[in-house]
Image (tube, helix red, strand yellow):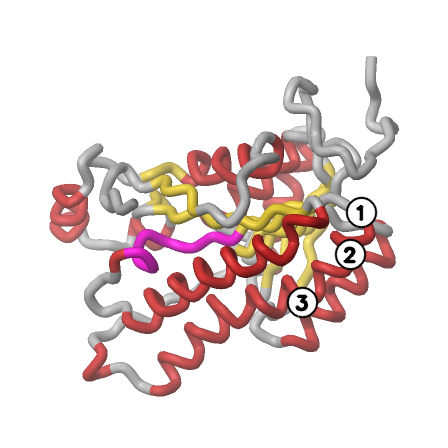
Amino acid sequence: METKERSVTAVGPDPTHPQPLLGRVAVVTGGSRGIGAAIARELAASGAMVIVNYVRGADAAAGVVAQIEAAGGTAQAEAGDVSDFGQVGAMFARVKERHQRLDIVINNAGILRDRTFKKMTIGDWNEVISTNLGSVMNTCHAAVPMLLENGWGRIINISSFVGQMGNFGQANYSAAKAGILGFTKTLAIELARYNITVNAICPGFVETEMWQSVPPNIQEKILERIPMHRVAKAQEIARGVRFLAVEGDYMTGQSLNINGGVYMGW
């Protein structure tokens, strides 16, 4: 029977192993709540040592770590504003010092500053672009050299169906999420030769604290747009991430749409 000490090489995970990510180190940005927390728990359940990144939610991040540890997994919380290039570099330097490797990067951090374009300020625009798109560049800039050392890696970027089709009042958010898709494709082309895949997931509406804050009458109007007439559970997005990390060996530069049918583009 294999143990947690089994060797990890440039060969990808064994999907038949009960914990195929044993020995791997994963960073999840924005991992203290919502989709990010679900991803952290899912990767930890598959054996990964998970770095739960946060900016202000220290207690929430500690709670995610506690949940993971209670379930028998390993994790640690790591503060760092991913929109700040210097903070990101320092965070990944700490990861390398403590763990000597990095295998999986999940770019999940994001914010909303929704307004119609005629009311949108330059601050609304810059903050969303910096946090949602600039952070992906910052994280990958720090992470890619570490992944290259392994000869294997997974970068999974959380985009949105809004980046594919747009949405009223979200010019900044849709631009950032569309930018993630273009970035994903280009980085996938450049890193494929090094056994590093780069993919995106485009969730639809997801059952998070943000969804719960939407008035019931607005929720019903949104549900009418979704063929499956429900929102996703965060765990469903997390399972998509696990699939790409564990079984997506021949997928790169792709967008995995987990949206209940709200967008069905090519």
Q: Amino acid at mark 2?
A: Met
Q: Is residue 256 left or right of residue 264?
A: right
The kind of residue tagged 3 is: His
Q: Is residue 56 visible?
A: yes
139, 46: nearer the viewer:
139
The residue labelled by disc 1 is: 150
x and y, in percent, of residue 121 in the image: 31, 86
How packed mark 1 is, by other alpha carbons closer than 10 Å (few <14, some 14-19, many 20 or more), is: some
Helix, strand or loop status at disc 3 = helix
State left or right for residue 84 relative to residue 231.
Answer: right
Q: Which residue carries the number 3 mark?
A: 141
Give the residues drawn in magenta, as a range: 157-164
Question: Residue 146 shows which numbered tag?
Answer: 2
In this rendering, the answer to whether 141 lies above or below 119 is above
> For the C terminus, which image quadrant?
top left
Q: Are marks 3 and 1 in contact (CB under 8 Å)?
A: no
Q: Are marks 2 and 3 in contact (CB under 8 Å)?
A: no
Q: Earlier in the sequence, mark 3 or mark 1?
A: 3
